Amino acid sequence: MTLTPSMASFAKDGLPIKLSRRLPADMSLSELTRAVEELAPPYDLTETNPTRVELVYPEGALAWALGGATALASYEPDAMGMRSARDFLSGVAGVPVDHLLVTASTSEAYAIAIKAFVEPGGLVAVPRPSYPLIPHLAQLEGADTVWYDLIPEERFRLDLASLERALVAGAKLVVIVSPNNPTGSVASEAEIAEAAFLCAERGAVLVIDRVFAAYPVEGVVPELPKDLPGVVIALDGLSKRAAMPQLKLAWMALHGTSAHSVAGALAWVNDAYLSAATPVQLALPSLWPHGQQMAAQIGSRLRTNLATLRAGALSVKAVGVLPVAAGWSVVVRVPRVVDDDGWVIACARAGVKVAPGYHYDFDRPGFIVMSLLPRPQSFAAGVRRFITVAQELV
């Protein structure tokens, strides 16, 4: 086909492409991010990718486990995930095999749950502070978010009154992240039971994100209470559980007295994707012990780095290291002599990268977030620079 001059002009310029309202209106880097990138601090205390912090992976054993699970002829699609994987996970999650769904990631699990239980324009209740991914996932599913609060006392505890307000406002999905990223707090059994009751009373589903449950630091991570009311979905996955983000596998474990009533709906949604890789599902029992070894290695590092930070902070009384019950991150309370951006820029100039609390939806200034995952030598060097900045500012 030969294009006429007018057709060729239109083909070149076209009409402006409008992006979906599910995407943020502005996706450019913030001024703070650009400024820190230009300064290029050599010590990054925001790094949370376990494959980039010099952990020792059993590469040969992992390759062997995956190599024995790649037979293409063994693919048997199942809307809930391969039966062999679910049989194994049933023992891990403590639920019947027909109350388990396998997904590629916990992000996909969130998307499936939102599709199943939240109408377009409906509400998902998310904690504040917490990792900012969940509001983005809700937005991508055409849902809105409503906050409930974690209150910083001796630990960050669930503000059940604000959670109830979110339910009264119409939230049909409530998310508890426990252990929470970045606060390191863990919801108590009583808090989870009360949240489940409030959700069941309002016909809402409770999702509990437990991906950091394998990493107790200064506390314990209790199992979910038995006989929870309503529908409770626990999320977990290899990405954090075994420090293997390159092997995509996660699962949704259905708890609660009404769990059986939603399994079919979730399977129907999951059947539209079937994106969990067959080799990883087949290799799961062989991968699991290596994942436990990785979790033990990381746990030792987390405790070492936290001790380093606590020792360094002793020299600056105005700086407080908050408790870390579990997880990979730590929150540091800093005096408001400058705003959070001022702290981050001062640290970057001194050679260390840290994150401002508002990146995690802290509703007040004076909080800095660090990852406990970097190798100890780098973490200690970064802490020394952070302490130097604190001494100069305070």
Image (tube, helix red, strand yellow):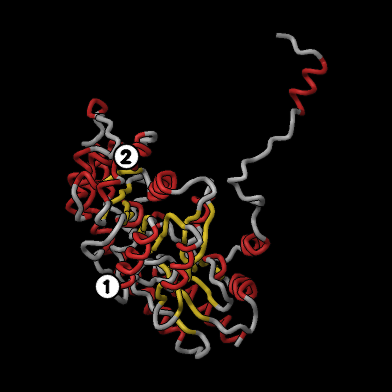
Mark pair 1, 2: CA separation: 32 Å
Q: Earlier in the sequence, mark 1 or mark 2?
A: 1
Q: Mark 1 or 2, which is nearer the eye?
A: 2
Q: Which amino acid, mark 2?
A: Ala
Residue 143: where, in percent of width, then height?
52, 50
Q: Which quadrant of the rendered structure holds the N terminus?
A: top right
Q: Is residue 158 left or right of residue 5?
A: left
**19 in relation to 258, above or below:** above
Q: Nearer the viewer, residue 368 or 137?
A: 137
> Farthest residue toward the top?
1
Q: Residue furthest right?
A: 5
Q: Which residue is mark 1?
A: 220
Quick one: 363 or 379, which is closer to the camera? 363
Give the quadrant of residue 74.
top left
Q: Amino acid at mark 1?
A: Val
Residue highlighted by disc 2: 267
Residue at x 63%, y 84% (from the top left corner): 337
Label 1: state its secondary structure: loop
Q: Quadrant of residue 214?
A: bottom left
Side of 157 where 37 appears, left or right:
right
Q: Judge by depth and name the residue closer to the eye, 315 or 271.
A: 271
**Considering the image in quadrants, where does the C terminus appear?**
bottom right
